[in-house]
Amino acid sequence: MHDDVISWLLDADPAIRWQAMHDLQDAPDDLVASERARVATEGWGARLLAGQADDGYWGGHVYGPDRERNSVMWTLQILRNLGAPPDAPPVRTAVDRVVTGVVWAEFDDLPYFSGEVEECVNGGVLANAAYFGVLGEGSDRIVARLLDEVLPDGGWNCEPADESQRSSFDSTLCVIEGLLAYEQATGSTDAAVTAARHGGEEYLLERSLFRRRSTGELVKPRYTNFTFPTYWFYDVLRALDHFREAGGHADARLRPALDLVLEQRAEDGRWPAGSPWPGRHRYELDAPEGEPSPWNTLRAMRVLRWADPVSLD
């Protein structure tokens, strides 16, 4: 069954294939690189890149005031999730257009990669900047803000601090993804950055990634909805994938979250697609709800391979 599922993944879009080769098969680097290069010129990646306007925008929006999902923010995030090679000419052209043309009009026309004011947004912008190789003064601004915005419980919340001192799972995950990407891209040895990320991770671990610390109850039912693209939304599988990316041994407190992922595995060894997140002009990059999902299957298998390999035998 395991081999059949991997064969099924290898028959999908190049974005799925190269990650399956890398994360599930330990394929040689040159073969993985060759397959990954196709993301920029074929399939989903090529279609997303082709949708950019000459002024650098996708969908006419930097973020999406009415929950548009085909904006600059989410298209770059998805290209990052696809693994579009940052140095591929079509990708470089697209990113250069963003650098020179896209601004946050509501925030004094700050350049896109300088971020804005909300923690969850800035975490995503930082992750995009790190991935696409455009870190600089804008990223320094974001990092400084995020370090200053840590809440007493160790996480972050896009709600103003004078309205809530309680962290949000969604905001916290977006931020620690950005800080990890920044550390990996820069080889950062800044103890403050690492400590802040670890604090956010600890916030999630103390809650088993989906439970209330006070009662042990599920915080929100949507945290068990695994779907792709993820946008800003938190879910347990996305959080587990972050901990896998951070490396090291799997913390024992991840066990309930891993069990939750295993509970969603179908009899054929694949994972079904969840309910797509709400929004206008969404990118349809996964199977319909309830049908076998290449994205959920890929992500679940690589998380389990890292944290619970016996479950894949």
Image (cartoon, rainbow, N blue to C red):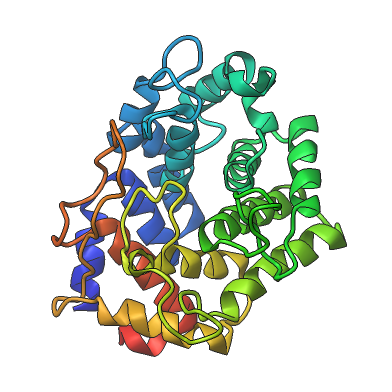
Residue 232 percent location from the top left of the image: 47, 49
Report the side of 296 relative to 54 (left or right): left
Question: In front here: 31 or 234?
Answer: 234
Identity of the residue drawn at 26% across and 66% down: 6
- Residue most toward the front? 163
Report the side of 66 relative to 124 (left or right): left
- Can residue 99 be seen by looking at this rendering? yes
Quadrant where the image shows the N terminus: bottom left
Residue 275 percent location from the top left of the image: 23, 56
Question: In front here: 83 or 260?
Answer: 260
Using the image, determine if residue 248 lies above or below residue 298: below
Q: Quadrant of residue 201?
A: bottom right
Residue 210 percent location from the top left of the image: 46, 75
Residue 312 percent location from the top left of the image: 32, 83
Using the image, determine if residue 250 lies above or below residue 93: below
- Can residue 25 be seen by looking at this rendering? no
Q: Quadrant of residue 280?
A: top left
Q: How many labels does the image show?
A: 0
Identity of the residue drawn at 28% across and 35% down: 43
Question: In front here: 312 or 65?
Answer: 65
Identity of the residue drawn at 58% across and 78% down: 205
Report the side of 109 relative to 81 (left or right): right
Quadrant where the image shows the C terminus: bottom left
